[in-house]
């Protein structure tokens, strides 16, 4: 029976993703173009916020992916811990810079949005602060990966860091909530929220979110392939030294 | 394990430097702040909780990389790893020694520095309490970071990068506790959170740190 | 009570260096590991001491029986000779360091700080640590480095006393210790250069 774990073989992974990636890339581009064009040009201006509201189509999806990238890293790290599949560890490594970029986009678009709305680029609001801290966790994680030479040791140590970091990231999230009530509105996308985003904005936003998810998957697969090849090169070099 | 603790304390006392260095650093940071923000006592007393906590945190950070690095270099860590005491116990004792030589002096010196920064008299007790509750967490979290980076040639900077985000909740609740104490507000929640973080860190992080040490020793 | 190693593979830096290592060590016996530099003697000893995982194979030894001594002696410069030894005795839950001091002729130096010892004296202190561990299987990595002839003799006597009392020793060394011991040339277990560990194999 075909098992999911067969894709943990680097060879099999390269073959499969090699076939899937072009399709995925086209799909990503289509979804993003449709979602963003729809959002930017075919939705009405908000009655209070005017045209500035349209940055939501970049801000919300990138913020979602910034968090989900860390979750994906955590899951991939746990898979490495339990099953010792190298592709899993490399996927976690590959996701980190993507997650960091998403965090940066969320913070930047947030600042651009916040300036006209709140009259300030930055405020020590719980959500903003949490994202800044998340960015710091990404930085530490990436730095630890690149500081350690032995790939297995690096995978093990970053896994430990990712697990401990997840606990502390949650703790920080709670701590900053307690610390400052903040300017940022609550999550406007939850289904039962009283004050929800109107459908005209909601549907193109969903398309954009789908586009960002696809973009994330594409980038992580691409980067994982690169990491596998880098690992292969170092294995070949090691073999040459031994000979 | 008590043997390990007493050896580390003896080493810290004899090596000079390490013992008083954190304390001196704490003093200097605190003294420098008024030169930066001006001598206005109203402003100073408002920012004093934050300054004292950030100063204590940086002073702790200063000596973190010594927790395991010295034992790693002279081979003691290899020998300790093959000794009958569990590596988790080694981590716990090392963190305890770090706290006794760095954290505890900071706790004791803090009221004096609080006077320098014009901290409200009502907040003095809270300052000591918050540091006493919080600094053990700083030592244990630091020991975890030190365990992650022990094998690296230039781990010091990386250690700070890894540890500082982990210090965030402790710093936040610690400074908040002092600020609330100074303003005469309810202090129950930050006190309990601070104690909870410290207890949780002391209970769980030695296992993570020992796992990291095992990876770094092989 | 014996140390049995069968079909053991061990790696350094993720690359297999030795494979198929097998031997048995009985109480009262010593085994000398031979082989050129870089062949993997240290890696083998660290694997057997449990400091790094083996790639494959089995090591069966009684629990908590191995005392390991590496190149580094694990001495603290600001502690005296007696304090260094007492520390390890307490860690290993034994008492009495006098026998160890006598065996390595360290009694006169007992109160001197370790930073004021010569390299050979430090080495003797590092070896004296083995006696206070009270463990039956000694694993020694180049134990005679920087020892003079008289100290090597002392060391040989200590080993023989240990073996006579039912202990075992596994020693990576290049010099003749005057021991009646089996020799094991590690070169025969050298991993073929084509063989990387299985995961890297999948990457290549």
Image (cartoon, rainbow, N blue to C red):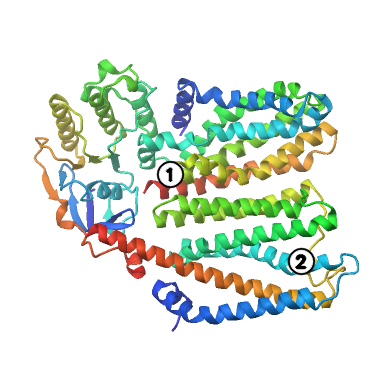
For the point 66% across and 79% down, the residue is A31
B70 vs A181: above or below: above
Label 2 vs label 1: CA separation?
Answer: 43 Å
Q: Which of the labelled discs sits on residue A55, or is there none?
A: 2
User: Residue A209's spot in the image, x, y percent?
Assistant: 69, 72
User: Residue C85's spot in the image, x, y percent?
Assistant: 33, 26
For the point 76% across and 50% down, the residue is A122
Front in this rendered view, residue C22 or B32: B32
Give the crowd class for mark 2: few <14, some 14-19, many >=20 residues within 10 Å: some
For the point 38% across and 22% down, the residue is C79
Q: On what subunit does the disc labeled 1 rest?
A: B
Q: In front of the other: label 2 or label 1? A: 2
Q: Are marks 2 and 1 on the same chain?
A: no
Q: Which of the labelled discs sits on residue A142, or is there none?
A: none
Label 1 sits on a secondary structure element that is loop
User: Residue A103's spot in the image, x, y percent?
Assistant: 65, 59
User: Residue B11's spot in the image, x, y percent?
Assistant: 45, 25
Residue B57 vs residue B10: left or right? right
Q: On what subunit does the disc labeled 2 rest?
A: A
Instruction: Specify the quadrant of the image occupied by residue A189.
Output: bottom right
Which residue of the protein is positioned furthest toward the bottom in this rendering?
A1
Give the crowd class for mark 1: few <14, some 14-19, many >=20 residues within 10 Å: some
- For the N terminus of chain A, give its image quadrant: bottom left
A6 vs C9: above or below: below
Q: Which of the labelled discs sits on residue B152, or is there none?
A: 1
A24 vs B118: above or below: below
Residue C9 in sight: no
Label 2 sits on a secondary structure element that is helix
């Amino acid at each position: 029976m075909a098992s999911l774990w067969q894709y943990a073989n680097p060879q099999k992974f390269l073959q499969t993703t090699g076939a899937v990636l072009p399709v995925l890339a086209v799909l990503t581009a289509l979804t993003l173009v449709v979602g963003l064009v729809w959002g930017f040009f075919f939705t009405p201006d908000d009655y209070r916020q005017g045209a500035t509201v349209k940055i939501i189509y970049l801000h919300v999806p990138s913020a979602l992916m910034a968090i989900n990238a860390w979750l994906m890293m955590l899951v991939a790290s746990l898979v490495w811990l339990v099953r010792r599949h190298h592709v899993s560890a490399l996927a976690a490594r590959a996701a980190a810079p993507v997650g960091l970029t998403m965090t940066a986009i969320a913070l930047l678009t947030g600042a651009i949005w916040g300036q006209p709305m709140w009259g300030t680029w930055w405020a020590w609001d719980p959500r903003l602060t949490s994202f800044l801290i998340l960015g710091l966790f990404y930085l530490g994680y990436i730095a630890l990966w690149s500081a350690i030479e032995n790939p297995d040791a690096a995978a093990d140590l970053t896994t430990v860091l990712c697990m401990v970091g997840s606990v502390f990231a949650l703790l920080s999230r709670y701590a900053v909530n307690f610390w400052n009530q903040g300017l940022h509105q609550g999550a406007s996308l939850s289904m039962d929220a009283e004050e929800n985003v109107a459908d005209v904005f909601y549907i193109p936003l969903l398309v954009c979110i789908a586009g960002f998810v696809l973009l994330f998957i594409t980038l992580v697969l691409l980067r994982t392939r690169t990491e596998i090849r880098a690992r292969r090169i170092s294995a070949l070099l090691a073999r040459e030294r031994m000979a | 394990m008590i043997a390990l603790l007493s050896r580390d304390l003896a080493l810290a006392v004899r090596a000079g430097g390490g013992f008083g260095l954190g304390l001196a650093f704490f003093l200097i940071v605190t003294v420098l702040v008024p030169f930066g923000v001006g001598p206005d006592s109203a402003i100073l007393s408002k920012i004093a909780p934050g300054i004292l906590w950030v100063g204590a945190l940086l002073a702790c950070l200063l000596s973190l990389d010594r927790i395991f690095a010295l034992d790693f270099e002279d081979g003691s860590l290899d020998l300790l790893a093959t000794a009958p005491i569990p590596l988790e116990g080694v981590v716990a004792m090392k963190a305890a020694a770090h706290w006794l030589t760095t954290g505890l002096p900071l706790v004791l010196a803090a009221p004096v520095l609080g006077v320098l920064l014009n901290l409200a008299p009502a907040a003095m007790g809270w300052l000591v309490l918050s540091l006493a509750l919080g600094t053990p967490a700083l030592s244990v979290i630091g020991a975890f970071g030190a365990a992650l980076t022990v094998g690296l040639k230039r781990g010091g900077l990386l250690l700070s990068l890894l540890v500082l985000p982990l210090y965030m909740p402790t710093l936040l609740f610690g400074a908040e506790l002092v600020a609330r104490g100074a303003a005469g507000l309810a202090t129950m929640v930050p006190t309990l959170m601070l104690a909870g973080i410290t207890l949780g860190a002391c209970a769980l992080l030695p296992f993570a740190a020992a796992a990291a040490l095992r990876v770094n020793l092989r | 009570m014996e140390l049995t190693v069968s079909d053991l593979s061990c790696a350094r830096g993720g690359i297999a260096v030795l494979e198929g290592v097998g031997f048995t060590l009985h109480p009262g016996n010593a085994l000398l590991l031979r082989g050129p530099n870089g062949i993997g003697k240290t890696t083998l000893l660290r694997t057997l001491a449990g400091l790094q995982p083996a790639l494959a194979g089995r090591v069966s030894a009684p629990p908590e029986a191995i005392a390991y001594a590496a190149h580094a002696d694990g001495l603290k410069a600001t502690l005296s000779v007696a304090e260094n030894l007492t520390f390890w005795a307490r860690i290993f839950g034994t008492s009495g360091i006098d026998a160890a001091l006598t065996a390595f002729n360290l009694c006169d130096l007992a109160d001197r700080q370790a930073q004021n010892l010569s390299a050979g004296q430090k080495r003797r202190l590092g070896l004296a640590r083995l006696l206070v561990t009270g463990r039956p299987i000694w694993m020694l990595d180049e134990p005679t480095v920087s020892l003079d002839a008289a100290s090597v003799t002392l060391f040989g006597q200590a080993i023989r006393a240990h073996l006579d009392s039912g202990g075992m020793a596994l020693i990576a060394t290049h010099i003749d210790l005057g021991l009646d011991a089996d020799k094991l040339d590690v070169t025969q277990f050298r991993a073929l250069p084509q063989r990387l560990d299985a995961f890297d194999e999948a990457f290549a």
